[in-house]
Image (cartoon, rainbow, N blue to C red):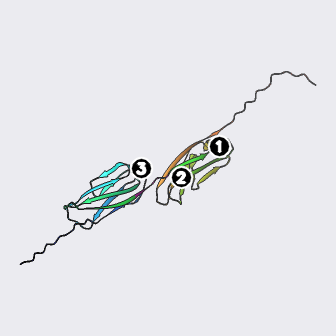
Amino acid sequence: QGTATTTVSIGEVIVSANASPSTVCSGSSSTLTAIVNSGLAPYTYQWIGPNGFTSTVNPVTISSMTSSNAGIYQVTVTDSNSCQGTATTTIIVDAINVNITGSNNVCLGSTINLASNVTTGVAPYTYQWTGPNGFTSTSASISIPNAQQVNSGAYTVTVTDSNGCQGVASSVVTVDIVSVNVVPSTTTACIGS
């Protein structure tokens, strides 16, 4: 009587996923890569993610990213034995939202006050203001005393966060001149009245 031995191997697909870079600025690109450590080639890939994202390519690059692309991406890898492995990775989209507050109309000789307000991004921030008549500043808020007509125009602030991502906002300031016309009186007055 004989003995037979059969070896059964259980297929397991071990996969990891990464995004490079995992934190991107709005408008930038990130590449998703699945790394397979076991299983039998060839492999097929099925990526799914936020905003209806799907792909069967590996690696896959997502371009012109917006906040709707932020989130968890999952890849399922299937080997030639139909065994599967799954992995996930996360992409953070760093979008900087900036607005400017302050007076858009100021009187001649008064003070122009503008402030940048950042509602997203990763602190700390740096600021770069530009404006009419060669104006520049690196403060979060600006103040220009004794405003003259040469100070009228567009003021733009570029805010950069700690990830190097940027947001831009502009505000148009008008320096108003108040004109006073003196009209001589035509009334006749008598001497001594």
- CA–CA distance between discs 3 and 1? 44 Å
Chain part drawn in magenta: 91-96
Query: What residue sits right under mark 3 in the picture?
Result: 68
Classify 84 as above or below 132: below
Quadrant into which the C terminus falls? top right
User: Which residue of the protein is positioned furthest toward the right in this rendering?
Assistant: 192
How packed is label 2: few (under 14 Cα within 10 Å), some, or many (20 or more)?
A: few
Residue drawn at x 48%, y 54% is 166
Residue drawn at x 12%, y 75% is 5
The residue type indicated by label 1 comes to Gln
Residue drawn at x 67%, y 49% is 145
The residue type indicated by label 2 comes to Thr
Q: Position of residue 27 (x, y in %)?
A: 41, 51
Q: Which of marks 3 and 2 is nearer the N terminus?
A: 3
> As rendered, which of 179 and 170 lies closer to the eye?
170
Q: Position of residue 140 (x, y in %)?
A: 58, 54
Q: Is residue 42 left or right of residue 189?
A: left
The residue type indicated by label 3 comes to Ser
Q: Is mark 2 on a helix, strand or loop?
A: loop
Q: Is mark 3 on a helix, strand or loop?
A: helix
How packed is label 3: few (under 14 Cα within 10 Å), some, or many (20 or more)?
A: few
Q: Position of residue 113 (x, y in %)?
A: 64, 48
The answer to if 77 sits in the magenta stretch is: no
Query: What residue sits right under mark 1 in the picture?
Result: 148
